[in-house]
């Protein structure tokens, strides 16, 4: 079953644009990973500076490859985390009969 991660980041005041740019770079690199099915970052319209990242991987092993990657270390751990007030994540498993993302395209 596909392995899903929903991460919520809250940027420190004044760092919102840097965090957004970092997420754009992270999304582009992550989408190239073999086990990544979908990777999309969004910013809240109601609470600017709150970002939600929706990730879908083939399985848990593919997600672990992602978090062990050089681009994850550089962009998330070294660049983004110091600019965040908080960082949370939920891990989910797709239920049978879930939607196919075969035709999904980045915006």
Image: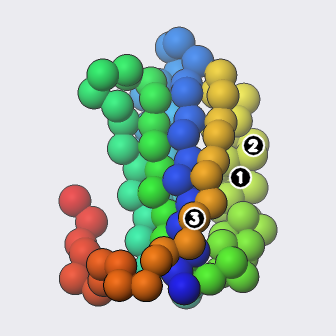
- Under circle 3, the secondary element is strand
- Left or right: where does residue 37 sit relative to residue 80? left
- Under circle 1, the secondary element is helix
Residue, disc 2: 78
- Under circle 2, the secondary element is helix
- In contact (CB < 8 Å): disc 1 and disc 2: yes
Residue, disc 1: 74
Residue, disc 3: 92
Q: CA distance from mark 1 to mark 2?
A: 5 Å
Q: Horizontal and vertical percent for residue 99? A: 30, 78
- Left or right: where does residue 97 sit relative to residue 64? left
Q: Which mark is residue 54?
A: none
Dot in front, 1 or 3 = 3
Q: Quadrant of the N terminus?
A: bottom right
Q: CA distance from mark 1 to mark 3?
A: 25 Å
Taking 72 as reference, is 97 above or below it? below
């Amino acid at each position: 079953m596909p392995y899903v991660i929903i991460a919520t980041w809250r940027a420190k005041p004044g760092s919102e644009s840097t965090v957004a740019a970092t997420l754009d770079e992270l999304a582009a690199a992550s989408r190239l990973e073999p086990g990544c099915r979908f990777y999309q970052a969004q910013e809240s319209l109601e609470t600017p500076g709150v970002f939600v990242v929706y990730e879908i991987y083939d399985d848990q092993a593919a997600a672990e490859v992602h978090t062990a990657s050089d681009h994850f270390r550089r962009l998330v751990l070294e660049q983004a985390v110091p600019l965040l007030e908080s960082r949370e994540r939920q891990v989910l498993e797709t239920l049978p009969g879930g939607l196919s993302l075969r035709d999904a395209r980045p915006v």
